[in-house]
Amino acid sequence: MLQIIQAATAEMGLPVPSYIAGNTADDAVQQLALLNAVGSRLQKEFDWQSLSTEYRFTTSASTLDGTTASGSAIVTGISSTTGLDTTYQVTGSGIDQDTSIVSVDSVSQVTLSRVATATATASLVFGKVKYSNPSDYSRSTPSTQWNKTNHWRLMGPSTPQEWQQLKSGYIASGPRTFFRKLAGYFQIWPMAATNIYLGMEYISSNWALSVALAGKSTFTADTDTCVFDDRLMIEGLKAEYFSVKGFDSSNFQANYRRELSAAKAADTGFQTLSFAGLSADYLIGFSNIPDSGYGQ
């Protein structure tokens, strides 16, 4: 971080600081803020390969005996409520669809969002449907959400209308799992009655790195580095600095845009496209047919 700011200030003909973190000089404070703004904008600008992150987790579900009373939302006699919370839904005899836990009252009792329609002591399935995103989650990568246990792609993201239809309609569940980001959670429907392994990719907000390579969302230390090219950050800082000072920044802006365009082009490879279309022979074709003995 310090070297980026030193290079930028030297190129702009400004006093070159010997340190930035903890420096209370107005220019140093502003340069650090502007550099962080550049990094933050770049993080949102493009799905950078270095920020693409895989996330894997196993759903949580358990079957527990409980006693329901018709017209009551309270379930008693549960063997253990350890691990249960308001991110769980419940299914079972006398439990309507889209019923979730409102509160965990004790080691053996929970209160549900809907009253039971029957009085019984029976097995109830408690399944977690709301999962927290990783701490560095910025945005999801489309079409990467998979049920790895069943080798099926998750269906979604569902629209609000689809989501309510799924939760409220006559046909509320099927073999496929739907998902939606709602209320800050990664939510699934229907509730998984058994533990299944899910996976997806997302874009991390941690574009900066500490000296120990721990991810960060801002520069805070002189020794911090970042996932972006130094020249791109230098040009971005120069363009921002001249702009906020009210100077003519058109040249710096043009340089920054060229560096940004080059960085995007170099970040990920691109497939070679054919005007003749793609072959559908994924499993067998000219590349893997033997010269002789075919079918032997």
Image (tube, helix red, strand yellow):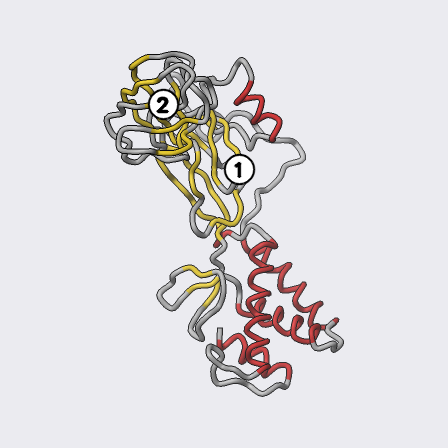
Instruction: Judge by depth and name the residue closer to the eye, 137 or 112.
Output: 112
**Picture mark count:** 2
Residue 104: percent from the left, percent from the top? 35, 34
Instruction: Kindly tell me whether residue 290 is visible in this rendering.
Output: no
Do the residues bearing badges 2 and 1 touch, measured as CB atoms within 8 Å?
no
Q: Which residue is the site of mark 1?
A: 182
Q: Is residue 101 left or right of residue 249?
A: left
Of the image marks 2 and 1, the number of the one nearer the N terminus: 1
Q: Locate residue 29, reporting x and y percent.
A: 55, 77
Q: Residues within 10 Å of mark 1 (few under 14, many from 20)?
A: few
Q: Is residue 98 above or below residue 142?
A: above
Type of amino acid at the residue the image marks with label 1: Leu
Q: Residue furthest bottom?
A: 15
What crowding class fits label 2: few (fewer than 14 Cα within 10 Å), some (14-19), or many (20 or more)? some
**Which residue is under mark 2?**
193
Q: What residue is drawn where x is 58% and y is 67%? A: 232
Give how far apart the Cα atoms at labels 2 and 1 are. Answer: 21 Å
Which corner quadrant holds the C terminus?
Answer: top left
User: Residue at 35% across / 29% down in the picture?
Assistant: 110
Q: Is residue 155 above or below residue 202?
A: above
Image coordinates for residue 101, horizontal then vertical, percent: 40, 30
Amino acid type at mark 2: Ala
Q: For the residue labelled by badge 1, is the local secondary structure a helix, a strand or a loop?
A: strand
Q: Is residue 29 left or right of residue 68?
A: right
Q: What is the number of the mark on residue 293?
A: none
